[in-house]
Amino acid sequence: MKLDYIAFKWRIDLPLNGLVKAFEQLKLQPDVKKRNQWTRSIGDHHLQVEYRPGVSNQERSFFWIRWQHANGNTDKSGFERLLAEWFYIVSQYSPTTVYWMQAVVHLEEFNSLYGFQESSPLIWTKEEKQYRYSFFPIRPGIYHFEVRSKDGKKAIQHHRFSTWLEEIKHNLLGNTRPDAQIQFDIFAAG
């Protein structure tokens, strides 16, 4: 499994101009080619923050934050510390809510996913506790994996993204039982 990118949709209870200082603290630079986007390069990886003006208003702003490698082979471990730093800094300005995680993965061979059901042709879903997981093809060999709250207005525990990706990777390797350590991590986190 090759990870193309990881992204989160999130909201903060501030207008966009209230966050510009946070972007500067995080060394994000305005993208000269694309309006409403800020980027930061870290080695061969890029952190991109995209403002969503169509769903934002004067009381709150919606964003996507994306972590991606230049050649599409993204290392999620580099994102863990950066994501924690990101949400620590922006939460100093106002509370944030993370609604949705997306990841795009490349696979050479697809194996059925343990615990997932094919809810409609080529869409596999699973519900656990407060989360809904979905996995479906975008193009041959390229799949979309997402995690959302069952109640679309509640936050997800974004810091668990690495565990979710490890679990899907374990499943895609053709394992028909959950990995004991991953299951322990999932249950321990609550």
Image: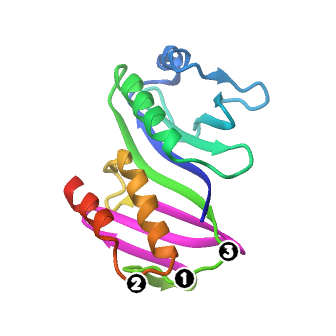
Disc 1: which residue:
111
Q: Please give the label number shown on residue 108.
A: 3
Stretch in magenta: 123-146
Q: Position of residue 130 (x, y in %)?
A: 27, 62
Query: Would residue 41 be seen by someone viewing this image from the given angle?
Result: yes
Pick the residue in front: 48 or 33: 48
Q: Main secondary structure of the magenta part?
A: strand
The image quadrant where one finds the C terminus is bottom left
Residue shown at 44% from the left, 61% from the top = 166
| Rendered position, 125 above or below 132 | below
* Magenta stretch: includes residue 142: yes
Indicate the quadrant containing the N terminus: top left, top right, bottom left or bottom right.
bottom right
Against 145, residue 72 (above or below) is above
Give the mark, 2 or 3, whose residue is nearer the N terminus: 3
Query: Does the rendering let one see residue 190?
Result: no
Amino acid at pointer 2? Thr
Which residue shows up at 40% across the image and 84% down it? 176
Q: Is residue 99 above or below residue 123?
A: above
Helix, strand or loop under label 1: loop
The label shown at residue 176 is 2
Circle 1 packing at 10 Å, graded few (<14), some (14-19), many (20+), is few
Nearer to us in this view, 43 or 23 = 43
Instruction: Residue 81: give x, y in percent of width and height.
Output: 44, 34
Magenta-span inclusion, residue 129: yes
The disc labelled 1 sits on which kind of residue? Asn
